Amino acid sequence: MNYFSKTGYKGNLTTRAGAVNTPTFMPDGTRGAVKSLTPEMVASTGVGVVLANTYHLHLQPGEDIVAELGGLHAFTKQALPLLTDSGGFQVFSLSKINKISEDGVTFKDPKTGDTIFLSPEKSIQIQITLGADMIVAFDDVVSLEDAERGRTTEAFERTHRWLERSLAEFQRLTRDMKAGERPLLFGVVQGGLDKNLRKQSLEIVQSLPVDGIAIGGLSVGESREEMHGMLEYLAPLYDTQRPHFLLGVGDPADIRFAVEHGIDMLDCVLPTRNARHGTAWVTGDKKMHLTNEKYKADSSVIDPDCDCTTCRTGYSRGFLRHQFKVSEPLAGTLVSIHNIRYLQRICESYRK
RNA sequence: GCAGGGUUAGUGAAGCGGUCAAACACGGCAGACUGUAAAUCUGCUGGCAUAUGCCUUCGUAGGUUCGAAUCCUACACCCUGCA
């Protein structure tokens, strides 16, 4: 029943900022903060790692400023181990404003007019300068539409070439670091919904001296069956000596499925975005729309079985609904705490 | 008292003879959101059936017209000038 015990990472994840129990859900603090939460609030949810994003922090305020202010931990006042995403996802999510070449990707921000260039080397440099404890190789993520146009193979191949470049740059920059000071590098597996490509990609990534394996290119709009099918297919192929990080997943049912199929780490914007939009998860993985009229005079907490700070403090559904209706940011904050805790509890339930 | 302007769905506000159950905004209701261009976006929002349909609405009461939220008359209330 507990597939995790058979395929999951065997040891605790050890980073230079401390050990992390797995499986673990990691909230996204894209621009250096988990939206609407203080580091104390984030810590109260029991999470072990917080993410930040290379693309966003490079654009603003710039990694040099972050470094000047003491690095990501000091800058964000976040003591928990930090993981930066490479900016590879922005190749997908900002595909309308970027241009991909073998060398790297050029982004043109339509708002600021800024042009930024990201390459495997550049992404690793930024992440090292930011001071993250775990970093991710710069990959080429394809959208479903692009996959239909046959870009999957191109992105798959490029991701591996870029991984070798990322790894070389990583080794160059960390050469003089002591073992305990060196951040961990994750390579990314691509291949779209093609099992053959996925298998090859996993073998290539696992053949390299990376510290962890990330599964990318899922949860980009494919069906749940397709995503689960791929996770099920990859599960027996994992090297259990290294942690497996499923990028961008998120939904309680997907987290359960992923963890039961050998995934050790997951990150997602869903708990915080849904929270800001008024949706909480409750026992049974059900969604609760707190803005619904039926909660107007509801004195119960979001989920009586939840041990998050929001539920334990006793904030009522009626109060939360009211704060949402009057657009008070506090509502999103309180529900973010609840949702992150909900996902973390799922992960904790799989730990031995 | 005289002259002029106004009264439109929960609110604000378009419309000024037919294609008007009536733009748009807000509010209301419901939903979506998966490595954050997302405190965002989508649908519905007179009533009843809900697929095309029917019924009652545009201050009130009459009238003109094949046809009125739109034109005319009277009345009610509000605003601005002059008394």
Image (cartoon, grey):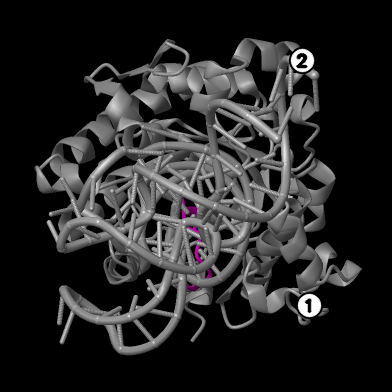
Q: Which residues are magenta?
A: A241-253
Q: Decide whether residue A290 is among the magenta residues.
A: no
Chain letter of disc 1?
A: A
- Identify the secondary structure beneath mark 2: loop
- Tag 1 and tag 2 share a subunit: yes
**Residue at (79%, 42%) from the top-left corner?**
A39
**Residue at (75%, 48%) from the top-left corner?**
A328
Work out whether residue A96 or residue A181 is closer to the camera in this orientation and state it: A96
A192 vs A186: above or below: below
Residue type of the residue flagged with mark 2: Leu
Work out whether residue B35 or residue A165 is closer to the camera in this orientation and state it: B35
A154 vs A234: above or below: above
Work out whether residue A23 or residue A89 is closer to the camera in this orientation and state it: A89
Residue linked to disc 1: A297
Q: Position of residue A192 (x, y in %)?
A: 23, 51
A282 vs A213: above or below: below
Q: 10 Å neighbourhood of mark 2: few (<14), some, or many (≥20)?
A: few
A335 vs B14: above or below: below
- Identify the secondary structure beneath mark 1: loop
Q: Position of residue A18 (x, y in %)?
A: 75, 44
Left or right of residue A297, residue A278 in this image: left
Query: In this view of the protein, can residue A336 be seen by the observer?
Result: yes
Any mark on residue A139, and which? none
In which quadrant will I find the C terminus of chain A?
bottom right
Residue type of the residue flagged with mark 1: Ala
Q: Decide whether residue A252 is among the magenta residues.
A: yes
Q: Position of residue A24 (x, y in %)?
A: 62, 59
Any mark on residue A69, and which? 2
Q: Position of residue B65 (x, y in %)?
A: 18, 57
The earlier-in-sequence mark between 1 and 2 is 2
Chain letter of disc 2?
A: A
